[in-house]
């Protein structure tokens, strides 16, 4: 278990170094030995100097939902940008906004952060406060002065969370999400063989550990 | 030729969005609404300008650099907007009349009620402790016969942390 954790840590660290090297290459606009080596040195130095608490990656990536999420996100930013632009130039002034508490199913810091950021990138909604322990985000909706608009903002935040969990959430997050969806009377997501298989394997491993 | 037209359309769209951001920053009535106007349409406008420039230059070098620019904007803009909105809300730089519904206010009121409850509990505990100490002292002085008959039980009342 410890060995696995250490290996995962190593893989994650390697991932960060690779991303930093990629940024370095992008900045220099060329791929040469010099740039790669100096980038690697710089990446290691940066990771030593600016140590950050490790991000808990779930180790899961669903390419279908990841792509779906990205397309959905770009489309939403596009549409909402023009909607907000219209609100600014239309003759009638903008209505009052609302601050809406949205309960998230996940407790993962990474996912809460991502939901907050995506919410902040889509025009018309902005997270102004987070209750980390209870995973509640407080979303300010622009031009949101009736119950219907309120529900729309809430629905959108839940949609972001659902898509993100489907794309990169851990099996635990998926379970929590499906429990929350069942409460709201929605169909569960990702009831796929792969996930069930993984859960079954985890259970089997646990039983094996318990036995000996 | 087609490329030029596409680039023009993109730059015009970007200019419109940036203009809208500026107008919104002036016209919108309160801080939180202004945060929407000034951060988001501008960002998409920037992406459109970058796209248009990329179409015109068609070299990998500048395109990758612009990719980084957009990426860092994507990371920093929502964080900045969140922090300003949060600071604005916490320092009460907001117009209540421009909020149709405020569930954060309700949550804060609940949390404050919990705090008051916790403080009262702590004070009660402290008072009980002081009374007991006093009892102990008098008991010690009088030879330790009457050891605090009206001892207040310690209050284990936990503040309500449920949702």
Image: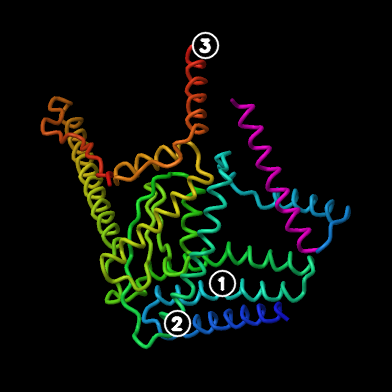
Q: Chain of mark 3?
A: A
Q: Residues within 10 Å of mark 3 (few under 14, many from 20)?
A: few
Dot 1: what SS?
Answer: helix
For the point 74% across and 64% down, the residue is B64
Q: Secondary structure at mark 3?
A: loop
* Disc 1: CA contacts within 10 A as few (<14), some (14-19) or many (>=20): many
Are discs 3 and 1 both within one chain? no
Given residues A206 and B126, the one toward you in this image is A206
In the image, B47 versus B123, the foreground residue is B47
Magenta residue span: A1-28
**Residue A34 place in picture, x, y as percent:** 88, 55
Which residue lies under the disc numbered 2? B24
| Residue identified by numbered label 1 | B43
- On the image, numbered disc 3 is attached to which residue? A212
- The answer to whether A146 is drawn above or below residue A115 in the figure is below
Seen as rendered, the residue at the extreme right is A33
Q: Chain of mark 1?
A: B
């Amino acid at each position: 278990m410890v060995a696995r954790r250490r290996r995962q840590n190593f893989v994650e660290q390697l991932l960060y170094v690779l991303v930093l090297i990629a940024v370095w290459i992008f900045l220099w606009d060329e791929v040469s030995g010099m740039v790669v080596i100096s980038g690697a040195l710089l990446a290691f130095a940066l990771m030593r100097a600016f140590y950050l608490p490790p991000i808990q990656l779930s180790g899961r990536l669903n390419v279908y939902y990841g792509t779906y999420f990205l397309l959905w996100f770009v489309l939403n930013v596009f549409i909402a940008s023009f909607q907000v632009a219209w609100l600014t130039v239309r003759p009638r002034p903008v209505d009052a906004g609302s601050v809406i508490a949205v309960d998230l199913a996940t407790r993962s810091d990474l996912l809460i952060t991502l939901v907050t950021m995506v919410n902040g990138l889509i025009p018309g909604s902005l997270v102004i406060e987070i209750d980390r322990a209870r995973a509640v985000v407080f979303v300010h909706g622009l031009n949101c002065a009736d119950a219907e608009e309120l529900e729309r903002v809430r629905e959108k935040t839940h949609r972001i969370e659902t898509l993100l969990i489907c794309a990169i959430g851990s099996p635990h997050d998926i379970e929590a999400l499906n429990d929350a969806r069942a409460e709201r009377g929605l169909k569960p997501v990702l009831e796929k063989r792969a996930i069930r298989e993984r859960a079954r394997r985890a259970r089997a491993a646990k039983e094996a550990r318990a036995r000996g | 030729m087609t490329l030029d037209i596409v680039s023009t359309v993109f730059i015009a769209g970007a200019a419109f969005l940036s203009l809208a951001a500026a107008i919104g920053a002036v016209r919108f009535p309160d801080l939180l609404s202004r945060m929407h106007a000034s951060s988001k349409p501008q960002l998409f406008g920037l992406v459109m300008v970058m796209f248009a420039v990329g179409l015109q230059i068609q070299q990998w070098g500048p395109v990758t650099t612009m990719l980084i620019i957009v990426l860092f904007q994507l990371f920093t803009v929502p964080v900045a907007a969140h922090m300003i909105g949060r600071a604005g809300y916490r320092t009460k730089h907001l117009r209540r009349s421009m909020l149709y519904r405020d569930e954060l206010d309700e949550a804060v009121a609940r949390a404050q009620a919990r705090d008051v409850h916790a403080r009262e509990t702590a004070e009660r505990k402290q008072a009980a402790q002081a009374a007991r100490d006093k009892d102990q002292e008098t008991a010690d002085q009088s030879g330790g016969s009457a050891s605090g008959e009206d001892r207040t039980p310690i209050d284990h009342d936990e503040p309500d942390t449920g949702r």
